[in-house]
Amino acid sequence: MSTDPHSFLPPELRAKAEAVIAANRAVGRRVALAESCTGGLAAVALTEVPGSSDVFEGGFVTYSNEAKQRLLGVSEDVLDTFGAVSIAVAWGMAHGALKRMGADVAVAITGVAGPGGGSERKPVGTVIFARAERGDAPDKMVADRRDFGDLGRSGVRVQAALCALELLMPPEADAP
């Protein structure tokens, strides 16, 4: 890894982005993102890597529910029923990004970065991730909930971006 000493990103985020770009380049995969609570941080990390344009198709920052509906096609009924921080919404975001970007894989991130906005069921630090892959059956869902705790707004966002980037790694890269 050739980490840029002038990068404003935390070193672990930059290193993970470099690994994602290299691994996906090696298997010829194009990736996309749909971000909410991270505000585009995962996309920033990917685009810090020189040559990332041959892997990173693009991303959406859909912070409001209206943006999730308009840009990614997330149903108003799903948002009303489950709330923006839910597996159903993350799944809709990932599939919307996959379809609209024409990528091979898309990852979505939605959560509560804080300091406010949390609840008993979804406290500050709760983040939901979903991954959609081209050619997968619509009912095949990869989703995860992580409870990072109150690490501060930036801390939650960095941890969420790291997890999202990990979900962009091709399965072959996970093998020992």
Image (cartoon, helix red, strand yellow):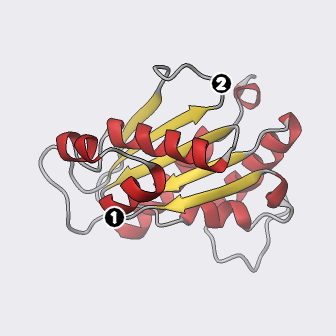
Of labels 2 and 1, earlier in sequence is: 1
Q: Amino acid at mark 2?
A: Gly
Q: Quote the CA–CA distance across marks 2 and 1.
A: 29 Å
On the picture, is 115 further left or further right than 175? left
> Compared to 85, does 58 lie above or below?
below
Q: Quadrant of residue 121?
A: top left
Label 2 residue SS: loop
Whole-percent x, y for residue 42 in the image: 58, 59
Give the amino acid type for the residue marked by disc 1 in the picture. Answer: Ser
Residue in view at x 31 percent, y 58 percent = 65
Residue at figure coordinates x 55%, y 47% from the top left: 97
Return the residue nearer the eye: 67 or 160. Answer: 67
Residue 170 on image: x %, y %? 71, 33
Place of residue 124 in the rendered image (x, y in percent of width and height, measured from the top left):
25, 57
Question: Which quadrant of the rendered structure holds the C terminus?
Answer: top right
Residue at x-position 76% and y-position 26% = 172
Seen at 34% across and 36% down, the residue is 88
Residue annotated with mark 1 = 64
